[in-house]
Image (cartoon, rainbow, N blue to C red):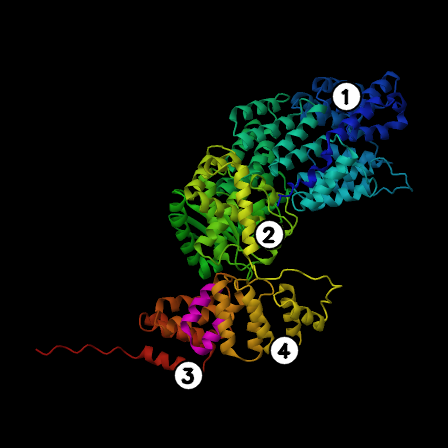
């Protein structure tokens, strides 16, 4: 069995590659530039510029100017093209000459100002401001064109106008112009483009996407609009973002921005060689492109931990403008994306040394500090951005988040700072401390690590707050928790995940990340970190983590879905579905398990130590096991055999509908009779029996399914259907026996745990209640009845301290009969704390004035204590 080829990102599709781009450049070079010099051809020349034909544009402009074409746009196109190919001094000279020749041309002044600003020519840029103001004031108020409105809006922004006013008063006015048939007035598309770019600067991705889409209705192949859409979608919808990025490259193979975004995506996917290939393309167009050198600096850090090369490439990126804050901002942002938050923060600090008011770096530094747990440094930075730019969506969201966190309770120990809503802290805060304390002791000792600084752990009841805190944007649906090293963020067990996942297992998993990320100084691939965390879940509780399933068996044997160990990162980056992501977690765990079982825990520790020293993952693994090729072959054999052994007596074939009609009970039963071990037929037949409420037959068929796969508790398992049948037949004893079986082999059988609590309460099986309440609250600690039943069980066993805690939690969760809970709590408190007992019995009577038992208890509490008899002399 061979491994499948490693999937490559859709985002890199257009690299097909170099030939496409080189061919495009050649085509421009061979075209007859003399055909384009006429004024009427300016729109076409703009298109050539957008498509990356910069040398050709320069030729056209030179010829047009030599023929005396009067429009200033020939000159602005020329200096913009000169900039694109790295002839920066020539571009500046041309821009200065243009503004001298056309001091009243607002469009020319704006483009020159943009050039001077990008290149750090502060003196020239400052000179432009007065000219821009004069030129804007001179634009007639009557009969303004859409292009006039766009340029006036751009001028207003340069001069410090309110962005909201610009969007409405200028860009909105430009977009209000109507196209006449196929004739689109000059400036309308630019209005959509300018509006979208402004929204992107404010991190308003939804508004940006809407604006760019509006422009595409007019120009469907406009590369700049497509590029805007790619950037608008990528943060929250990678698939859509990649699709639009591919369209940019199709429309403009040499689009610098799109190529650089592809290079960054390749770095994020750890496809470092592909990233270098894309950067080579960029540098063929502009050997001095600063951002290309910045990405090469990132590659030197991530791929080789090569500080000398990092500094060399960074210096090269700053060659054009030594004080360019965007370079360190870009480097830091990408490093932080790869969990290098400390290095990322250092880069942002360098950027802010160059420009203390550079808002992107301030905001990114705030995010880095949040992920490093240095929240007291983060909030002031985010607030500064919000004050300077009140339209910045991320800064606004962070301010809302800060206020939300300020309302949280803080549970602190020597090792942990735990923040969660006050009402939640009273319900499961103590359990969080217990789990984390145990994890720190066990995992720290196992991996030889003593974490001295407190770990910050935050629980969010609102998924959007969790997303903003964790990712700096909305999204992240389906993620239960995130670890940044010394900081863990989690969806509260009372949030969208309530009743679906075991939050205790998730917390153990995330703290394991704290240990491994700290041990490697955040220099480990995601797959290894996830694999160790899932592995350690299973070591803590065999029912946690993941195990083989019919779906995984099929993926391994039939779909050949295993990823080579040397390319394991791609299992996460290129997952085609949620199921493939879960399989990536599972395979990562299998690799870790294979290493530990065959080479010992010392090998795993050695790998982590090497990663901390900057050794590449594949080299580190080979150094502590065997050659990667040999390891991959052995692992593949073991994983394949494990899949074969899973349900080895099961017939896994799924007949075609033509062979067996799946909706015909008779056809399915007939097939099952001939194939009694067929998994599909057993499951299908069981569902049909349930629909017909033939409960005794359901029990018998469920037993056959259980016999085939006794450890399977996933969808369509035999236990759940058998328990349902017993419940429908009112066979409590039979139901109870099945539920106990499920509870013993699954940590997420939430409904079974709760049913066992109910049955245990009816039969006064106090031990069963306590055991299953612990299992239930590990999934959802906010069910009032669970705590009430626990209180009753503990009270019956005379564990008064535990009973008090359970009844108090029940009261906090708004019980339907608070007088009953208060009465029971008062009874438990009576022997040890008569004063508290009296308060609760009074509360019980306040809710139920005729509560006889509560009156009796109150009388007992009010009886005077007998005076001690005096000793007779």
Question: Looking at the image, is mark 3 or mark 1 nearer the viewer?
Answer: 3
Mark 3: give few (<14), some (14-19) or many (20+) Cα within 10 Å: few
Is 820 within the magenta?
no
Asked if residue 793 is positioned above or below residue 421 in the image, the reply reads below
In front of the other: 292 or 92: 292
Q: What range of the chain is rendered magenta?
A: 756-776
- Dot 4 or dot 2, earlier in sequence: 2
- Residue at 54% x, 59% y is 501
Real-space Cα separation, disc 1 to disc 2, in angstroms: 48 Å
Residue picked out by circle 1: 99
The single residue placed furthest to the top in the displayed view is 66
In front of the other: 393 or 263: 263
Give the x, y percent position of residue 492: 52, 56
Residue picked out by circle 4: 694
Give the x, y percent position of residue 18: 73, 29
Residue picked out by circle 3: 852
Question: Looking at the image, is mark 1 or mark 4 nearer the viewer?
Answer: 4
User: Is residue 754 found left or right of 802 in the rendered image?
Assistant: right
Real-space Cα separation, disc 4 to disc 2, in angstroms: 46 Å
- Dot 4 or dot 3, earlier in sequence: 4
- Label placed on residue 371: none
Is 764 within the magenta?
yes
In front of the other: 44 or 667: 667
Question: Looking at the image, is mark 1 or mark 2 nearer the viewer?
Answer: 2
Question: Looking at the image, is mark 4 or mark 2 nearer the viewer?
Answer: 4
Mark 2: give few (<14), some (14-19) or many (20+) Cα within 10 Å: some
Real-space Cα separation, disc 3 to disc 1, in angstroms: 94 Å
- Dot 1 or dot 2, earlier in sequence: 1
The reply to whether the C-beta atoms of the residues labelled 3 and 1 are less than 8 Å apart is: no
- Dot 2 or dot 3, earlier in sequence: 2
């Amino acid at each position: 069995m061979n491994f499948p080829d490693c999937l490559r990102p859709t985002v890199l599709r257009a690299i097909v590659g170099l030939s496409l781009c080189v061919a495009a450049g050649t085509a421009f070079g061979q075209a007859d530039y003399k055909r384009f010099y006429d004024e009427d051809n300016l729109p076409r020349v703009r298109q050539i510029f957008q498509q990356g034909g910069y040398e050709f544009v320069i030729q056209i402009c030179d010829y047009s100017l030599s023929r005396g074409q009067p429009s200033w746009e020939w000159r602005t196109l020329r200096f913009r093209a000169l900039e694109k190919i790295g002839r920066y001094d020539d571009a500046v000279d041309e821009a200065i000459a243009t503004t001298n020749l056309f001091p009243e041309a607002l469009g020319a002044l704006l483009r020159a100002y943009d050039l001077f600003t990008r290149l750090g020519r502060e003196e020239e840029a400052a000179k432009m401001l007065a000219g821009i103001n004069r030129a804007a004031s001179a634009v007639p108020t009557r009969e303004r064109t859409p292009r006039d409105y766009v340029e006036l809006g751009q001028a207003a922004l340069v001069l410090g106008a309110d962005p909201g006013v610009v969007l409405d008063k200028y860009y909105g006015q430009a977009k209000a112009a109507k196209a006449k048939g196929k004739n689109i007035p000059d400036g309308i598309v630019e209005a959509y483009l300018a509006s979208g770019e402004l929204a992107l600067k404010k991190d308003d991705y939804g508004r940006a996407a809407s604006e760019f889409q509006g422009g595409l209705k007019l120009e469907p192949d406009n590369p700049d609009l497509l590029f805007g859409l790619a950037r608008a979608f990528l943060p929250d919808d990678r698939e859509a973002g990649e699709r639009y990025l591919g369209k940019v490259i199709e429309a403009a193979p040499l689009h610098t921005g799109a190529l650089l975004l592809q290079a960054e995506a390749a770095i994020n996917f750890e496809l470092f060689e592909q990233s270098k290939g894309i950067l080579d393309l960029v540098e063929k167009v502009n050997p001095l492109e600063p951002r290309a050198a910045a990405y090469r600096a990132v590659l030197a850090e991530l791929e080789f931990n090569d500080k000398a090369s990092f500094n060399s490439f960074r210096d090269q990126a700053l060659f054009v403008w030594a004080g360019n804050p965007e370079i360190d901002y870009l480097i830091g942002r990408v490093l932080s994306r790869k969990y290098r938050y400390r290095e990322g923060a250092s880069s942002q600090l360098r950027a802010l040394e160059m420009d203390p008011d550079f808002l992107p770096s301030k905001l990114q530094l705030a995010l880095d500090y949040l992920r490093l747990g240095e929240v007291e440094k983060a909030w002031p930075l985010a607030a500064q951005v919000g004050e300077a730019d009140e339209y910045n969506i991320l800064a606004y969201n962070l301010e809302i988040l800060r206020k939300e966190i300020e309302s949280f309770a803080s549970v602190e120990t020597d090792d942990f700072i735990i923040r969660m809503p006050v009402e939640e802290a009273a319900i499961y805060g103590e359990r969080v401390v217990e789990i984390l304390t145990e994890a720190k002791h066990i995992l720290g000792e196992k991996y030889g690590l003593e974490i001295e600084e407190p770990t910050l752990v935050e629980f969010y009841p609102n998924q959007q707050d969790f997303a903003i805190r964790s990712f700096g944007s909305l999204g992240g649906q389906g993620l239960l928790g995130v670890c940044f090293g010394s900081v863990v963020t989690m969806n509260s067990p009372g949030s969208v995940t309530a009743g679906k996942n075991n939050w205790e297992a998730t917390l153990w998993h995330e703290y394991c990340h704290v240990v491994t990320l700290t041990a490697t100084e955040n220099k480990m691939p995601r797959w290894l970190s996830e694999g160790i965390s899932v592995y350690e879940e299973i070591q803590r509780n065999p029912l946690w983590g993941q195990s083989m399933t019919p779906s995984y068996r099929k993926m391994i044997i039939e779909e050949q879905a295993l990823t080579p160990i040397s390319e394991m990162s791609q299992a996460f980056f290129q997952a085609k579905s949620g199921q493939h992501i879960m399989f990536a977690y599972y395979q990562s765990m299998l690799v870790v398990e294979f290493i530990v079982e065959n080479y010992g825990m010392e090998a795993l520790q050695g790998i982590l130590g090497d990663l901390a020293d900057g050794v590449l993952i594949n080299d580190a693994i080979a150094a502590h096991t065997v050659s990667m090729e040999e390891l991959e072959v052995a692992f593949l054999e073991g994983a394949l055999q494990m899949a074969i052994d899973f349900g080895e007596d099961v017939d896994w074939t799924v007949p075609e509908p033509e062979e067996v009609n799946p909706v015909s009970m008779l056809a399915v039963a007939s097939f099952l009779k001939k194939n009694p071990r067929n998994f599909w037929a057993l499951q299908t037949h069981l569902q049909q029996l349930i629909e017909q409420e033939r409960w005794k037959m359901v029990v018998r068929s469920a037993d056959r399914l259980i016999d085939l796969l006794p450890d399977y508790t996933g969808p369509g398992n035999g236990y759940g259907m058998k328990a349902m049948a017993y419940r429908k037949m009112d066979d409590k004893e039979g139901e109870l026996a099945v539920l106990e079986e499920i509870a013993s082999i699954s940590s997420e059988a939430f409904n079974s745990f709760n049913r066992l609590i109910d049955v245990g309460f009816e039969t006064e099986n106090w031990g069963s209640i306590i055991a299953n309440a612990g299992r239930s609250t590990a999934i959802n600690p906010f069910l009032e009845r669970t705590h009430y039943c626990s209180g009753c069980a503990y009270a019956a066993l005379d564990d008064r301290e535990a009973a008090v805690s359970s009844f108090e939690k029940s009261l906090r969760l708004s019980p339907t009969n608070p007088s009953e809970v208060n009465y029971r709590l008062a009874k438990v408190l009576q022997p040890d704390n008569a004063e508290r007992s009296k308060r609760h019995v009074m509360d019980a009577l306040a809710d139920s004035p005729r509560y006889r038992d509560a009156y009796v208890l109150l009388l007992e509490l009010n009886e005077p204590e007998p005076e001690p008899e005096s000793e007779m002399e």
